[in-house]
Amino acid sequence: MGILPFAPALLKKFLLKPGSFWASLEVWVEKDRSLTMTDHILMCPPVYFEVKYSINPWMENQIGKVDRALALNQWYSFHQLLCQHANVELISPSKETPDMVFTANCGLVWGSNFIPSRFRHPQRQPEEPLFTEWFRQKGFDILHLPESITFEGGGDALPSCDSSFLWAGEGFRTHAKTHRILARELNCRVISLHLMNPHFYHLDTCLCPLNDGVVLYYPPAFDPPSIDLIEQNARETIIVSDEDALSLTCNAVLVESSLYMNSASKMLRDKLEAIGYTVSILPMSEFMKAGGANKCLTFSWKTSRP
Ligand code: ARG
């Protein structure tokens, strides 16, 4: 919710300027809140991962080119590190779904609800019942979206740092209609952003909500009204360069104040460290051949500690 939940976005942006009294109070409140929350992360071992078809520009010319031993290595190093900082859970891979390793796309957790994805491409649709069953067994209430729409879960729906609203992407995989349905069914504010660049076909490839209302993003992936929306609703934005964006730097995993990313220029790393983040670089070259990096390999949600 933040410390000024009902203030208009522009006023908040002014009051919460880095270094202000309100900003430091919010940092403190956020820290306190994060100590009472458990971070859960769902991952899927890349046993059957390969590029078998092409459904995004990164996959073109990559069919059959994954170095499988390297992919396993990259994934296991990442998994091991995350296990030290979060409650990491696994879902069994399936032979028929090589992209299932990208658990970010399983759906969306909102309170006690799990909203399963409705994949745009038939190649990924067999993942839907597998993820749904996993969350059902964990005790979530399953909320199905209409069959006529598409939704790619955590790829296109990112809870704000305090889970008070959703940043949502549309244009390639998720229908704009879906955003309105989510807002109505979940009774939450959804900030609908239009994606423009086929290389950044999921919102999590070009925008990463950090703590305390800071948003890391790549403006050329969005149309001008969406850029305005991001600037109005973030307390502070950090803009990434073309080079960082093309290394899928925005596809970062955040656990408390640690960021795990595929790569970062020195300039970006310095900026992030200056505002209190620890940056760990875990290269994901093999998964980038399928159009995904660190964040795509994880699906996160939080629960309150009893
Ligand atoms: N090959 C996968 C696809 O095109 C990659 C998914 C990446 N996931 C993400 N959350 N951006 O669907």
Image (tube, grey):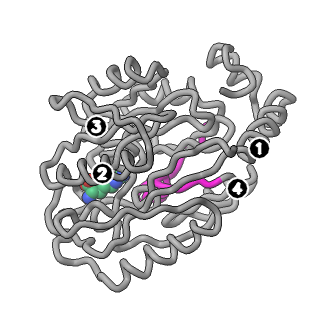
The nearer-to-camera label among 1 and 2 is: 1
- As drawn, the label of residue 31 is 1
Look at label 1 and name its amino acid.
Answer: Lys
Residue 228 x, y percent position in the rendering: 49, 25
Q: What stretch is highlighted in magenta?
A: 237-255
Looking at the image, tell me whether mark 3 or mark 2 is earlier in sequence order. 3
Q: Do the residues bearing badges 4 and 3 touch, measured as CB atoms within 8 Å?
A: no
Q: Is mark 3 within 8 Å of ligand 1?
A: no
Q: How far, Cα to Cα, is label 1 from label 3?
A: 32 Å
Identify the residue shown where x is 41% and y is 33%: 168
- As for residue 246 lying within the magenta part, the answer is yes
**Which quadrant would the C terminus be assigned to in this image?**
top right
Identify the residue shown where x is 45% and y is 39%: 109
Instruction: Identify the residue under disc 3.
Output: 151
Q: How far, Cα to Cα, is label 4 from label 3?
A: 31 Å
Instruction: Identify the residue under disc 2.
Output: 199
**Which quadrant would the N terminus be assigned to in this image?**
top right
Look at label 4 and name its amino acid.
Answer: Tyr
Looking at the image, tell me whether mark 2 or mark 4 is earlier in sequence order. 2
Which of the pair 135/302 is nearer the observer?
A: 135
- As drawn, the label of residue 277 is 4
Q: How far, Cα to Cα, is label 1 from label 4?
A: 13 Å
Identify the residue shown where x is 43% and y is 64%: 90
Residue 265 x, y percent position in the rendering: 57, 63
Q: Is residue 29 left or right of residue 80?
A: right
